[in-house]
Amino acid sequence: MRMIPIQWYDDNNSHLARLLFFMFLSLNSCKQPLALCATSLLLACFSMPTQAQSAISESPILLAESPVSDTPRIDSSLDTEDGTEQWNIHGQSTYIVQQKNNFNSPYYGQNSLLNKSEGGGSKSYTFSATAFLGARLWEGAEIYYNPEMFEGTPFNGQLVGLGAFQNGELQKGSFAPPVYYSARAFLRQSFGLGGGKEHIESGPNQLAGNIDKNRIVVSYGKFATLDFFDQNTYSHDPRTQFQNFALFSMGAYGYAADTKGFTYGAVVEWYQDDWILKVARLAMPTIPNTAQLDYSLSKDYGNQIEATRKHELWGQPGALRALFYQQHAFMGSYQNAISYGQETNTIPDIVGVRSAAQNSWGYGLNAEQAINEDIGVFARWSWNPGQTETQTLDISRSLSGGVTLKGTTWSRPNDTVGVGYAINGISASEITYLQQGGMTAFIGDGALNYKNEQVFETYYSAKVYKDLFISADYQRIANPAYNSARGPVNFFGVRAHIEI
């Protein structure tokens, strides 16, 4: 997730505007405004006027930066004296509201996305606020803690009905009134390997300081898998960029996550010149799509390895990434569910055939390339065999790509336009399972006329005041949940995002 560099000003009007914005979101997004106001006021306090200033980078496009970025903002290619932070505090808040059309739906099932006529006419929204706290412990060691507030309601009141969901801020459930939790709490230890020094800026989960260009970094604790893996400059952050799961990430990447999208484990990163190699073992839920993780990392876990090669093409930066992952967990098999249903003359149910020590795997390719200072393109391909129930999305193969354009040509250099497209599919065994009336955690119309799910998304992000961005977003999803008998669905959304 990219957090735009902030320059603080001793400006009471600036502080007041931020405070009023947070209060507005609090009072208009939930049934318990006082609880949200408390969180909003806490974040707003972080923006109290101060004399300190941080450099503003000349990033050409509203870029993605994961909360644990492998490409921290560099303000100097040389060692800088007296530029080391001992601690820092950053924050963000994001509000997204979406509505959909009364799409065609001749029938629906337990896990269908409902149209207005079927009782699904209410809006979907999410509201999050996060504090990023960091401190330096000893040489090369840093500790980070991210308390977070989240409130959100999917369409239907539950997250169902699509292979690729339309809002990456949506969790695997409905949380209203808001919930408060520890999103991240992890230790990072860096070991320098030479190659010269560079100075990195202060940022969320990143302390300003001098680091070796070549290094090994070990992170241990609680975080999100996508904090480290499947990063992409032009599409990785639903809070500022594309919102659809199949566009800001590899759709078929079955990464480890609990019901709020976080995991526990260890990640090792090796930076060597233009190469980055990452390996990790991360905890998966003891029961699919639930909150309890296997903290032993011995029964239910995911292993992954990813290699990144940075390059320049025609003088412009780019990167290629290749990822492989393995799941070892308590899961059910679609074929076993189908067979058991035939034996008992019942509708197949994957929950009833779950067993321990089941394995799955998959891979993904990820590319990004700057065309010039204003235009960047990206593409992803991911695949898994789709034989076992999903731990993330009901997608077995996904191809996506898009372009982002900075608004320099129309005198809005801090605005960004994005256009993206994804096509998703599922395995033959899952198709049969759904055609026989089976339900997964997220999809199931009771019947299925299979076609690939297709996603089109475009957004316009406008910088309206310093670090406040307002975006308009449109998505069109054809064959929702792979059913050509239903849809297409048009989603219209507005997003407000502020950084502190």
Image: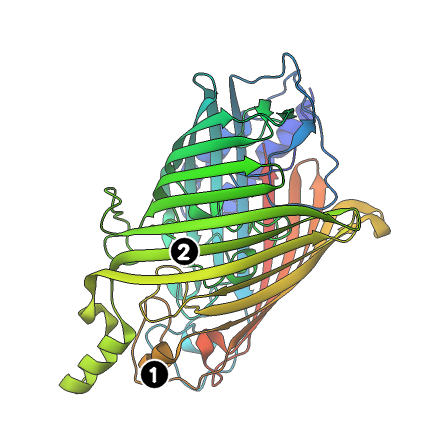
Residue denoted by label 1: 432
Name the outermost residue toward the top. 82
Q: State whether residue 417 is above or below residue 137.
A: below
Image location of residue 421, percent across then percent down: 62, 67
Q: Nearer the viewer, residue 141 or 434?
A: 141
The disc labelled 2 sits on which kind of residue? Tyr
Provide the secondary structure element on which disc 2 rests.
strand
Provide the secondary structure element on which disc 1 rests.
helix
Comes first in the chain, label 2 or label 1: 2
Does residue 243 appear anywhere in the picture? no
Q: Which residue occupies 24% across, 56% down?
A: 287
Residue denoted by label 2: 325
Q: Is residue 108 left or right of residue 166?
A: left
Q: Which residue occupies 30% across, 74% down?
A: 439
Q: Quadrant of residue 72?
A: top right
The disc labelled 1 sits on which kind of residue? Thr
